[in-house]
Image: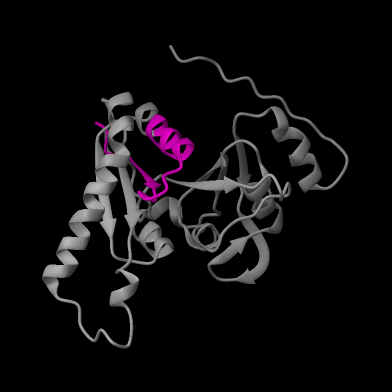
Amino acid sequence: MTDAVRAVAEKTPGSPVSRGRTTRKNAGLLVVGARGSGGFDGLAVGSVALRAAAAAACPVVMVPELPADAGDEAEAPAAGGSARVVAGLDAHEPVDEAADFAFAAAKAHDALLRVAHAWTLPATFVSPFMLDVTEKDRATWEDQEVLLLSDALRDWREKYPEVAVQPDVRLLHPAMALLTASTGAELLVIGRRTDPQTPEGRLGPVAHAVLHHARCPVAIVPHAG
């Protein structure tokens, strides 16, 4: 038997942003709709949702609006742990809170966890003086990134041994890597570093791109420091 969910509805004065700020002070998770009113295809995240994602002290799950016919075309997740959770993780500077959130979500839903890590060619090889990069060099650098991601995931694999993990290392811009890796996923998890000097919060360009273009719910998990 599953535990019952207790729902409490509240109507409070003020703007949605100010109400959200008050509500999320003691919340463990904030869920917001991503629909905006800008009228641009693919840029459908409203200002309220963006400000909540940037400033909340707790994880924020942003749920995009699905097309009217999405229910007819969407594939139902198969049984046995096939539903996927995708986590974006910078293996050079991993956000522990985001990794923990993603592993916990995958465990709760018996889901395969795909961990996406984007990398770029060394700056010395991306210059007018370097006209070509050999496949051997590229493979060597990619192997190093794979090992780096494996090291970053070691503690989480030990903490969540029941979670099946699929590392996904891509030579792409981080936003493109995340959007590509999350195709067909049920949840995409990304981290957000907080800055005590900006209490209203701030989202970086990668987070903005992901939130505007992702076709699945996105969890933004804050990290202090």
In the image, the segment drawn in magenta is 80-105
Q: Quadrant of residue 141?
A: bottom left
Residue 139 lies, in percent from the top left, at: 15, 64
Is 160 displayed left or right of 223 in the figure?
A: left
Where is residue 51 drawn, in percent x and y?
A: 69, 52
The one nearer the camera, 82 or 178, is 178
The residue drawn where x is 37% and y is 33% is 103
In the image, 33 versus 176, the foreground residue is 176
Q: Residue at x 30, y 38 (%)?
A: 153
Instruction: Tell me: 197 left or right of 186.
Output: right
User: Residue 104 colored magenta?
Assistant: yes
Expressed as whole percent of the image width and height from the top left, the position of residue 99 reads 41, 38
Residue 12 appearing in the image? yes
Q: Most extreme residue toward the left, as rendered?
A: 136
Q: Looking at this view, is 19 or 144 the one in front?
A: 144
Above or below, 99 against 34 in this view is above
Instruction: Choose between 151 and 14: the one closer to the eye.
Output: 151
Residue 31, placed above or below residue 163: below
Q: Is residue 35 magenta?
A: no
